[in-house]
């Protein structure tokens, strides 16, 4: 009593069997691809990433100098050592800023206004004879090397030398 499946029944079973896979074969829309990519990036963004800073790498100056208590304290990874080094850097930067401020003020003060007399030749101007020179006073600004300027330059040079002798990073003087 076997009955042969008719052609219509056979094709109905094929359609029912292939129906779940129909969505897999269809092309994705651009909006759908963009949405999936955005979701993927949001998930990646939530994962923590390691950010490296200068504190993660030893400085070249510290590596080349002999071990000192300052370097050993910084290597101990104690929070107080990091705070002390940061405070030390701030102090040096303040000292350099003050020295540069004094130098800048001394440079500004070194410009002085003076009155000079220059002689301008007549050359036949309004009845003057050709050999007569006319004195003219003009106001000029001149740069005069003052003691204050020399002392400010020397103070900045001494501070740079002190930083170098202390074995600290030269960037602290900038």
Image (cartoon, grey):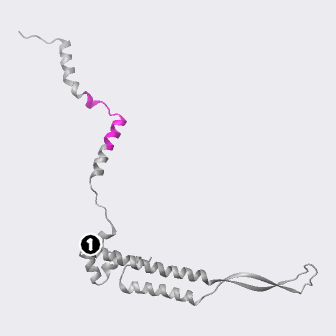
In the figure, is residue 94 to the left or right of 64? right
**Outermost residue to the right:** 127
Identified at 74% across, 81% down, the residue is 139
Residue 114 drawn at (x, y percent): 71, 85
Residue 67 in view here: no
Identified at 18% across, 14% down, the residue is 9
Residue 84 in view here: yes
* Residue in the foreground of this view, choosing between 84 and 168: 84
Identified at 17% across, 11% down, the residue is 6
* Residue in the foreground of this view, choosing between 153 and 24: 153
Q: Mark 1 sits on what residue?
A: 79
Residue 105 drawn at (x, y percent): 56, 80
Residue 81 drawn at (x, y percent): 28, 76
Q: Main secondary structure of the magenta part?
A: helix
Residue 56 drawn at (x, y percent): 29, 69
Identified at 42% across, 77% down, the residue is 93
**Outermost residue to the left:** 1
On-image quarter of the N terminus: top left
Looking at the picture, does residue 30 appear above or below residue 115?
above
Is residue 53 on the magenta stretch? no
Q: Which residues are magenta?
A: 22-38
């Amino acid at each position: 009593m076997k009955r042969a499946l008719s052609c219509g029944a056979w094709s109905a079973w094929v359609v029912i069997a292939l129906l779940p896979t129909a969505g897999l074969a269809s092309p994705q829309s651009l909006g759908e691809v963009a949405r999936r990519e955005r979701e993927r990036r949001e998930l990646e963004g939530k994962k923590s990433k390691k950010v490296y800073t200068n504190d993660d790498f030893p400085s070249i100056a510290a590596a080349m100098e002999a071990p000192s208590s300052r370097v050993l304290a910084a290597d101990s990874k104690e929070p107080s050592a990091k705070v002390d080094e940061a405070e030390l850097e701030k102090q040096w930067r303040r000292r350099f800023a003050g020295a540069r401020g004094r130098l800048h003020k001394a440079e500004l003060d070194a410009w002085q206004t003076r009155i000079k007399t220059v002689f301008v030749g007549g050359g036949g101007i309004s009845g003057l004879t050709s050999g007569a020179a006319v004195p003219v006073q003009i106001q000029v600004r001149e740069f005069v090397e003052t003691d204050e300027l020399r002392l400010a330059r020397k103070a900045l040079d001494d501070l740079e030398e002190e930083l170098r002798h202390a074995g600290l990073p030269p960037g602290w003087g900038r």
